[in-house]
Amino acid sequence: MTEWPATPGSWQNPVRRRLLAGGPVFGITLTTSSLDVAARAATLGFDFLWVEMEHSPITLETLRHIVLATRGLPAVPFARVPVNEVWAAKRVLDAGVCGVLFPFTSTPALARQAVASCRYPPLGCRGSGAGLATSTWPDTTDYYESADCNVLVVAIIEEAAALSHLDAIASTPGLDALFVGTSDLSFSLGCRGRQNEALLDAAIEEIRQAAERHGKAVGRPARNAEEAREFIDRGFRLFQTASELGFLEAGAREFFGSLKRPQPGPADTRLY
């Protein structure tokens, strides 16, 4: 990862800061438009909000509302864009996010495009119309300088085709992290979504090693704390955890599993 610029007193992206210090970071996946849920999630111990714009109906307008609702709260907003394109990155950055996750980054050219999309000229090709972002950005000194230094750029590796380009992708200047999209990678390898397959495990380890060789943080999904601990021991530090709906379901299952109430019969409609 790129070291911090020498700008005393300026804001530092807490996710980047923690990764540079060697610590793990955790993001909750947001898939619904509830601002109350986003604001509450930002105070529960997560380092960032993984706003899911590839696999959920969250719109750019909702993303902006999430940025506004969570301003100043501990977890900073990131967005997974629906496609690795310059226009997609520009839109979410101008909404004020602190990190962009680029899906299906399977070639060195796409890795370079991801970085360029998140940097202003001469470092990249981002347009200068960031009026909304400047009004909510934590650093009030110089948004353009601060954004160039602080926006986290993450390439998601989730296609078998990327495996032959790992060193070229991981060595991309300005790229902060590789994230293993284990489910899509499993499908791409012919495992049809199954985890813990030898072929998939070998590919994941290839990605981890490539990130390590080139000084990049590496991440993957973690379904529970036990998995997270195991993956941390194996060198992973950037984690996507369950969605808000997943945590809701898990909490409900835990509640009713502990309650062990009798199941109602066909004519029993009492509410407990």
Image (cartoon, rainbow, N blue to C red):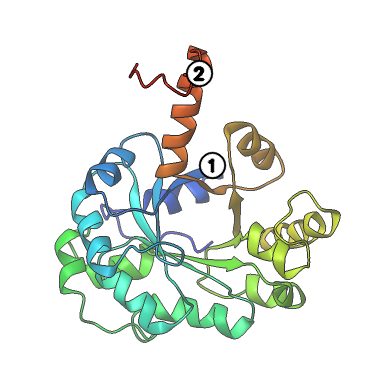
Q: Residue at x 25, y 52 (%)?
A: 9
The image quadrant that residue 142 belongs to is bottom left
The image quadrant that residue 193 belongs to is bottom right
Label 2 crowding class (10 Å Cα cut-off): few <14, some 14-19, many 20+? few
Q: Earlier in the sequence, mark 1 or mark 2?
A: 1
Note whether 150 is above or below 102 in the view shown.
Answer: above
Q: Residue at x 59, y 53 (%)?
A: 219
Amino acid beneath label 1? Gly
Residue depth check, mark 1 versus mark 2: number of the one nearer the observer: 2
Q: Which mark is residue 206?
A: none
Find numbered disc 1 in the image and state the secondary structure of the residue it sits on: loop
Note whether 27 is above or below 90 in the view shown.
Answer: above
Residue identifier under label 1: 23
Q: Is residue 121 left or right of residue 204?
A: left
Q: Is residue 235 left or right of residue 114?
A: right
Residue identifier under label 2: 263
The residue closer to the viewer here, 88 or 257, is 257
Q: Is residue 173 left or right of residue 205?
A: left
Amino acid beneath label 2? Gln
The x, y position of residue 210, in whole percent, is 72, 64
